[in-house]
């Protein structure tokens, strides 16, 4: 399981946007986004590059810290 910090989470809408973006990446599962901690946790297959995660999140307007 991996935990990342995300800048820009403001409300549950942001949380669901980020959740959907992460769930949309092939090989990523068990996605959980925590608004209070501004963090996301997920399980990624070994073939998933960290940049793929960052890009998916930045594409929808958030930043991985
Ligand atoms: Cu929001």
Image (cartoon, rainbow, N blue to C red):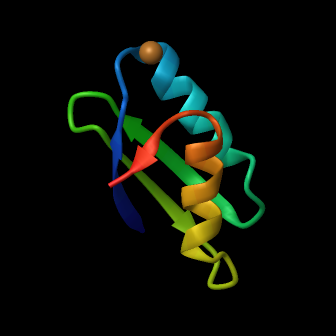
Left or right: residue 1 versus residue 21 is left
Left or right: residue 59 versus residue 19 is right
Q: Quadrant of the C terminus?
A: bottom left
Left or right: residue 30 versus residue 32 is right
Q: Quadrant of the N terminus?
A: bottom left
Vertical position of residue 9 compared to residue 7: above or below:
above
**Residue beneath the point at 55% across and 53% down:** 30
Left or right: residue 65 versus residue 51 is left
Report the residue that reaches farthest toward the left: 37
**Residue beneath the point at 34% across and 19% down:** 10
Residue 49, x across and y down, in percent:
62, 77
Residue 53, x across and y down, in percent:
58, 60
Instruction: Tell me where residue 39 sits by quadrant.
Output: top left
Residue 63, x across and y down, in percent:
43, 45
- Looking at the picture, tell me which residue is in the foreground, 27 or 13: 13
Q: How many marks?
A: 0
**Residue beneath the point at 21% across and 29% down:** 36
Instruction: Tell me where residue 35 sits by quadrant.
Output: top left
- Looking at the picture, tell me which residue is in the foreground, 64 or 28: 64
Residue 5, x across and y down, in percent:
31, 51
Vertical position of residue 39 compared to residue 8: above or below:
below
Ligand 1's image quarter is top left
């Amino acid at each position: 399981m991996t935990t990342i910090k995300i800048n820009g989470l403001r409300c549950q809408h942001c949380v669901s946007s980020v959740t959907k973006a992460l769930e949309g990446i092939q090989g990523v599962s068990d996605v959980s986004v925590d608004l209070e901690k501004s963090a996301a946790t997920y399980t990624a297959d070994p073939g998933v590059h960290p940049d793929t995660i960052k890009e998916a999140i930045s594409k929808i307007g958030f930043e991985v810290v």
